[in-house]
Amino acid sequence: MTVKIYGYGDELTINGVRIGDLSPSDHENIEKQRGGRNYAPLEDVIVSHVQDSSTLIARFPDPDDIKKYIEKELLDGLCCYSAVNQGQLNKIVVDAVVHHLTKEKIATVPRSIRHKYMSAFLLAVTELTGMDRVVPKVAGVEAPELMFKLSRRWGYFKKGIPANEALVVVAKENFHGRSMFAVSASTDEGSREGFGPFLPNIEKVPFNDISALEDLFSVKGDKIASFIVEPIQGEAGVIVPSDDYHPNVAQLCKKHNILYCVDEVQTGFGRTGAMFAHQLYNVKPDLMACGKAAGAGIVPVSFVAGSDDVISVLTPGSEGSTFGGYPLGAVTAVYAIKALVDMNLAAQAKEMGQRLMRHYEAIRSEFPDKIKEARGRGLLTAFEMHDQPHLDGHRVSVELLKRGVYAKETHHSTVRVAPALTITAQQIDYLAEKIREVIGSL
Ligand SMILES: Cc1ncc(COP(=O)(O)O)c(C=O)c1O
């Protein structure tokens, strides 16, 4: 077996197959034949490249010739599920990465030898988060995974929970990724089926229900190490808790000596109009998981930031990752932060989010029989339709696509809209107008 690879972009050719010659259905066939079939992407569309921070160039089947394609602009209403808060190919980050690779010339060294960019990463992240310590990881899912491990170790080393008896509490309908901790913690049967046995000692309480948490803490509090929760549940359909939920959770955790751990992989980095969503509620968690926009959509970067008391339970050999905090990742994260701060993107998210919400309210008053509710903070938003067969979120995504907008349903009747924080007022208005058109057509 041999593989011959040459060319760039559309000229990229793998054993005689030139990428630029493939139609949307060719791509789909290759994915179905050679991929893992673990996604069901929108059909008949292939993203080719980006045009600007919120515009993708996508290929659609040529109506005159199924073997060919035509290119059209797509307004990106999702920005890779909040991985690209800084906008696609943010110049501050791209310039820094190109400079880093071509002038500074260091991509990768292991953690067993220090490199100078790790200090830059640690300084920037602790300053931004206001936390004592930070541990770098790579994929988003690794951050809540590490919070889980830290919780258990802290439970044994600091709280004095008897060995192997620690409990971790999570909220129902959560999403923490796809690792064994994440699916063990999940209440979504689709992500669990066939993957058991699951990790033991995980308790699940309803989200935004302080009495359920209080009841559990008062019965099992001695053995509970932590409560891991998203400040706003993203994948569940942008579920915003009542204003007093997080302050009450923080207080209750303190009372029972239980760690309050927030998963900000989706809500962090300016998304909700605050730098981190927990700040909307004036609370300080013991641990915070971040990912996605921590690498500005250029390279994957995630981390857990937290208090000295908790993170100091780690010892050499107890935790690690080849690419966690490697020079390229560290540098990208530093400039991802610089872009966010220098471009004032959290404030921008707040303003543009309010504009989008006003549009949703206008659409809801125009179609009260179709739109049930609009929700969100900053630019993490969703609208939910009434539960009727024709008000189908997937159909909305397909119809939006036809009109040049990319957004995706999270559930049957809920569509999430979470564009880059660099989106302009004009683009927000365009996006809302297309949503209005599609809702009107259902
Ligand atoms: C809150 C939360 N945690 C963790 C993850 C997992 O991140 P990743 O898919 O990058 O592993 C996600 C992804 O959507 C998320 O929303």
Image (spheres, rainbow, N blue to C red):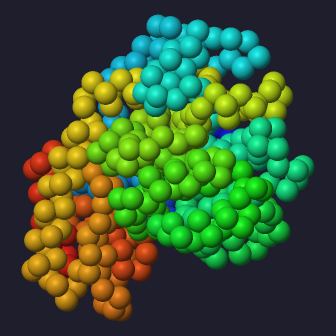
- Relative to 358, say whether 93 is above or below: above
From where the camera sits, is residue 275 visible?
yes
In the rendered structure, the answer to whether residue 308 lies left or right of residue 313 reads left
In the rendered structure, the answer to whether residue 328 lies left or right of residue 90 reads right
Image x and y of residue 404, in percent:
22, 61
Residue at the far right in the pictured view? 163
Q: Quadrant of residue 366?
A: bottom left
Image x and y of residue 34, in percent:
64, 60
- Relative to 301, say whether 394 is above or below: below
Q: State the residue at coordinates (64%, 20%).
A: 108
Q: 99 or 410: which is nearer to us?
A: 410
Q: Quadrant of residue 58?
A: bottom left
Task: Identify the image quadrant of the N terminus.
Answer: top right
Label tally? 0
Image x and y of residue 281, in percent:
37, 49
Image x and y of residue 181, in percent:
71, 56
Q: Quadrant of residue 403?
A: bottom left
Q: State the residue at coordinates (68%, 43%).
A: 146
Q: 127 or 25: which is nearer to us?
A: 127
Task: Identify the image quadrant of the C terminus.
Answer: bottom left
From where the camera sits, is residue 22 visible?
no
Q: 396 or 318: which is nearer to us?
A: 318
Q: State the residue at coordinates (66%, 47%).
A: 257
Q: State the residue at coordinates (65%, 52%).
A: 256
- Relative to 79, say whether 172 is above or below: below
